[in-house]
Amino acid sequence: MIHKIDALLAEIEHLKANSNEDLEALRIKYLSKKGEISSLMDDFRTVAAEQKREIGQKLNLLKMQAQEKINTLKEQLENRNTSEEMIDLTRTSYPYHVGTRHPLSIVKKEICDIFARLGFSIAEGPEIEDDWHVFSSLNFAADHPARDMQDTFFVMHGADILLRTHTSSVQTRVMEKTQPPIRIICPGRVYRNEAISYRAHCFFHQVEALYIDKNVSFADLKQTLLFVAKELFGAETKIRLRPSFFPFTEPSAEMDISCNLCGGKGCPFCKYTGWVEILGCGMVDPNVLENCGIDSKIYSGYALGMGIERITNLKYQVKDLRLFSENDVRFLRQFEAAT
Ligand code: DAH
């Protein structure tokens, strides 16, 4: 009997199972009620008393090893099922997302590209500014409400260090350093002390354009505006200028475009007027030129400024401004095609 047990121990050590069926057959052969080990247990009853101890121990060992082997084979089979057999080489790969440009960057780039085709180059300035560049040089009266704490974030009130409220400050910085001809476009972030809601934020983005040379007239401005509107919103786009006021331009105007959703027929988006407002503009006030060391008797120029969020909303109908700064990939991924 001892030989039989030894033979089985050796046999068990080399067992293999290629499938669950193989494994079950092995279990039945060795461990079931009618299996080899059970039958040895039966024989054990007839073993002479003096051999019982030795054979009993071996038999227990055999049973334990058989059980262990079956368990190991089972584990191996399970692992193989998940790691090898389940791989489907014909399956298409998992889609993975390459990043997207932010919608505001897409539109900013588009605006800059349009102006670049007209010969404008990009100028940038600091976001932390002083009163002179944001207000005083631009002809803001001392008591202009924009200077109020309600609208402007002051960094150091006494020293008049503040977060710029518009990109018009870059105009001054460039004019102070450069004599005409000047043809620049200034994209950038601006800050205003507004309660955050779906239609207002405490920071947003603008693009400013400035053209100063001899004999620049309102006709030049209007033609530029028409070109930019058509490039941005399509060749059928019409523009309309309404008289307005800005401290740094005289005369000043606001520009509407024919509603890009209904084509000017009137819809809820344009509040049935057929027009939507997109920017402010005007002829640079001679005071501003003089403030920056440019002779207003020789030179004239136009300026315009627009909100990038506003243009993006018009192009993509983004209903809630907050989406632009929340970094929700479900929103951002919708711009993959436009990148
Ligand atoms: N700076 C103005 C604003 O923030 C926008 C603007 C209006 C800019 C008219 C201009 C301009 O250059 O001519 O609302």
Image (cartoon, rainbow, N blue to C red):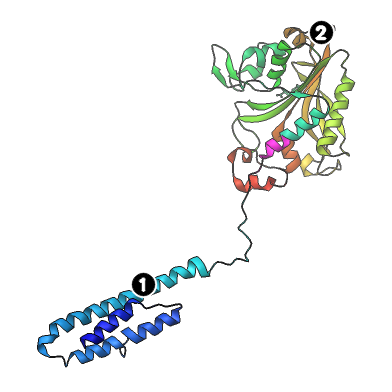
Q: Is mark 1 within 8 Å of ligand 1?
A: no
Using the rendered image of the protein, determine whether residue 273 is visible from the camera's viewpoint. Answer: no
User: Which residue bears the numbered disc 1?
Assistant: 72
What's the residue at 59%, 26% (across, down)?
193
Q: Is residue 51 left or right of residue 249?
A: left
**Mark 1 is on which residue type?**
Thr
Numbered-mark total: 2
Which stretch is magenta? Answer: 99-107
**Residue annotated with mark 2:** 296
| Residue under the point 37% across and 83% down | 26
Magenta stretch: residue 103 in it?
Answer: yes
Quarter of the rendered image showing ligand 1: top right
> Between residues 208 and 240, which one lies in front from this camera angle?
208
Q: Are marks 2 and 1 in contact (CB under 8 Å)?
A: no
Is label 2 in a helix, a strand or a loop?
Answer: loop
Give the quadrant of residue 34. Answer: bottom left
Say whether residue 155 is visible.
Answer: yes
The relative height of residue 171 versus residue 265 in the rendered view (above or below) is above
Which of marks 1 and 2 precedes in the sequence?
1
The percent position of residue 68, horizontal first and vertical second, equals: 31, 74
